[in-house]
Image: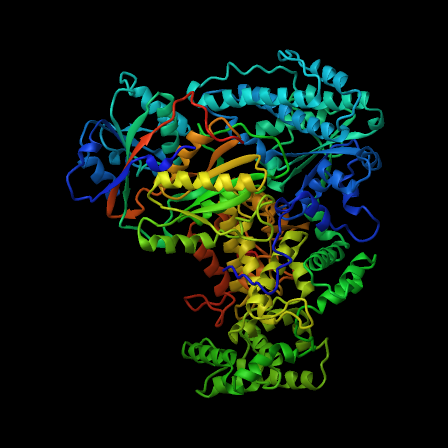
Amino acid sequence: MTIQSREAPNPFTVTKAVDFTDEQILKTFVDLPGEPGGFVKLINPTSPMPMIVLGGKGSGRTHLMRYLSYPLQKVRAAGRPLSEQLKAEGYLGVFVRCEGLNAGRFEGRHQTADVWLTVFAYYFDLWLAQLVLDAIANVTGTAWSEETSFCSDVWELFDLPPTEKPADLLSLIGVLRDLQRGVDVEVNNAAFTRSLERVVARTTRGRLVFGIPELFERHCEWFRGMLVVYLIDEFENLTEGQQEYVNTLLREKRLPTSIKIGSRRYGMRTYRTLSAGEENREGSEFELLPLDQQLRTDPRYPGFVCRLIARRLVQGGYDSDRTLEILEKSDLTSALREHLRGKFEELPSDPPFERPSTAFITENYQPDQRPYLLRLRDKLQRAQARNLAPGMKRPEDAASVVEALQAPDTPLLERTNIFLLYQSWYRGENLLESAAMLRDLSSQYASEPDPKSLHGRILGHFKTDLIAQLLREGRQTQRYLGLDTFILMSTGLPRALLMLLKHIHQWAAFNGETPYGNVPVSIRSQLEGVLQASTWFFHDVRTTGPTAARAQQGVDRLASLMRRMRFSDKPVESSLTTFATNLSETSTDTQRAVRHAADVAMLIDVPEGQKDKNMRGVVEKFQINPMLCPRYDLPLARRGAVALHPWEVDVIFCGTPDEFDGVTRVRVERMMAPFRRPDGARYIDEPGQQQNLPGIQ
Amino acid sequence: MLKYDIFYRESYTPNGPWPEAAEADLFVSAYNPSIRVTRVFENALAKEKKWLVHREYGFLDTEIPAGAYVDGGGDEADFIAGFFDQLAGYDLKTLSICVDITGFMRPHLMFLFRYLMHLGVKQLNVLYSEPVQYAERQKTTFAKGEVTSVRQVAGYEGHHSPDSTGSDLLIIGCGYEHDLISYVAEAKATAGKLQLQCFPALRPDFYQEATLREELATESVSPGSGGAQGEQLSPYLAPAYDPFETAAVLHDIVKGETERREVKNIYLSPVATRAQALGFALYYLYEWRGKAASVIYPFSAQYAQDTSIGLAQVWRYVVELPEENAIPSATP
């Protein structure tokens, strides 16, 4: 659903760097809090060491690389001489979008890979040469005394110079464009001719790419000691062979040239080069900047995104008293964060019973009509009829058990009692006795809440899940509210946060609210917006190919399984969004799918791999991205992890629907009262069974 | 400017006699078991009829009509060129040709016209059959399985500018498949994007069904840096069954955009009806061949064999192709 509002322009409408003009890139660029130039220092454009910047969709990678490019340097100059601006920054940034190369046409058509590689390398060199010459022409202007001799020297870079020798930069660029056109014609006509014989590479590979910056340094005095930095973005658009060529350029780069490659994580198909098949290695040939991972763990991230929000609100006209503008400029972002927190309605925290968060139960249900009580009574009666309710013999026993667990004024305590009874049931304990004991312990806790008591410990671990169960049982939407929640959900992807705020704003406007005014955005609008953004994220991270399809299916199934486990009678771990497995024992297709899911940020690698007693080898852990959690009613925080056997992971990512149903059934049935197999036998966690069905860690 | 409305088109009811004007020396169609493809093939009056079979439909050997030309692998250029290699003895320039595009995959039908132009064919009859409805209404999926790549269509690859300022334009011909729209939009994320929707639709209810699905792709079709900042532009409209009107509307859209702002590269992507794809092809061949423009398409490994029910009517278009050496009329 798309909602438009004329009254309140949405300051978060544009969420992609590609949708911004150069001026807007500069206006919306926000730095990390603390020392100035935080982001620029991450990429370090004045370092000759090449860098590979890996960032998921929405990590801000393109925004950052464009910020470093010459058109933005020019905007930053703001009227001062360009040479001074570039000298101050120490480099000339040449931004290269691989998307524009349409690299997919450099294959097939009855040509060998070697032929295509030769053609592509020549084409890529011509492409980069035009871009760097465009920037040089722009920065030197019309009064560059060395222009003719520079063009003449560039001419000498050709092994087979084209017929005309250009006297100025525009003519030189025109010649290169004609050469590119010649290659285009031959490549495009290969569909008819099935031949590329007429493509003649007129330069040695890399000679234009490195030679032009060298000549510029030689001919331009003020440029000496500076760098030409090729900012090659959207690397994922190149095939493996094409990447090998660019990797070779990176390996063989020479001053005054440096190369920074930007790619999505899944997009680095190879680190191999054409230099005898050598691989580029981190620390040796390049530095690696995993941008979203870096932001996810950077303590400055919340402050940074608060600044981002403030900048959008200021530019959107939501800062009439200039409070945000002042707060945004402050080195300390805590005051800004607090100010922004107040823009979103939240339910007050009231530990340990959280009455405001659970008031919908007391408001909507009579004490003996609460859905979880009715359900428990029904389960007890059915189990008693099958002789599966330990200790229950008389017809009125079910009602007695339920009555003992009631705590009408404190639904959370009441729900905790139910949870504890299910645990007793699972252990095969006498349910009448358990209920009586829980009544006493519950009363004691109600009058004197001791965090070390049984109820205190359960609430310490499971409070979020128990409230989630109450919400579900009370037919309420799960709650994902407030600025801090949104920042947590975005997990190092600023665009995810912007999308959340965009959808929340749309719903607020639709619901007749005035977002970011004196009244906080309502809970209703936040919930609607979060759900919509979550669904957007699920579809947005998708890429092409069978591995991507398996990854998306697998994460969808995994999250569904975790939802079933979370809302079971006896969830065995709190805040379940993580699984652990020995990935090396899964199939190749599964490994690829899981890695791809992590590469596109559907899953997040949990760094601490560990040895598992029940499964051989090192266990890897993956968390479902919090952006996806609202779609599946899952919690945002990560606490426990379900250990999955490799065959289960195989089924989840690559199995048939029936196979997946089987895995779900086996996993969930043991968590549902009466905790018996279909044949009535108890589930017993015997060592032998653990081998086949790992438990919760 | 070329007046696309001078091209001739007419429609027939499926139960009437085969129109004399559509009789041909050579009738070509892409096999698909749907009634709107097979009935037209059966009824066609031609000295010679040829089936082509796309491997992407996944037919069993026993399902393929006798004598059909079967895709031997490779891309759309290999497929079409391979088919015409078999007709090496024919002088296509002198034959009357009739092509039913209904069963063709869109990239292959586009290359077919590019190749016929390359062979010097100047005019041919083209048929397109409308279904009564699509099999699963708005849930109909034509592409089956995942999209494997988004790339340029052979023969429609232009000469692009390396400029990185984001002043590109992508026009998506939108149909039922919102997924395809998203894939195309993502593949040219930098471009300003405009949507060309099918209206009037083949049948009145199709437009509503397609709109429901396009809504799902809205987030992907962001305006782009060349688009209107912060606004979702209203889609343009062209009839689903009229390639000539589609070409004319494309001409107007691009003219308007290029007058409004600098456009460095143009990308066109028809993912709706075959008639629309033909319109995109003609527009490209007449106005953008060899310039900074391309047709791109989201390719899938498999396509559903039969997505339609019934045969409502048959359109005949008299398509004239430009000469290979003619200079396209547009200037980037």
Image-quadrant location for residue B283: top left
Q: Residue at 73% across / 79% down in the picture?
A: A450
Tell which residue pokes out farthest to the left in this image. Answer: B17
Q: Is residue A182 left or right of residue A485?
A: left
Q: Residue at 50% across / 63% down in the picture?
A: A668
Residue A545 seen in render: no
Rendering coords of residue A483 (x, y %): 68, 64
Rendering coords of residue A340 (x, y %): 72, 65
Q: Quadrant of the C terminus of chain A?
A: bottom right
Vertical relation: A663 (above or below) A550:
below
Colour scheme of the picture: rainbow
Of residue A4 and residue B76, the one placed in the foreground of this image is A4
Vertical relation: A457 (above or below) A185:
below
Q: Is residue B111 left or right of residue A498?
A: left
Vertical relation: A254 (above or below) A571:
above
Rendering coords of residue A660 (x, y %): 45, 54
Could you tell me how many numbered marks the image carries? 0
Residue A666 seen in render: yes
Image-quadrant location for residue A437: bottom right
Rendering coords of residue A449 (x, y %): 71, 81
Of residue A577 and residue A549, the one placed in the foreground of this image is A549
Vertical relation: A645 (above or below) B32:
below
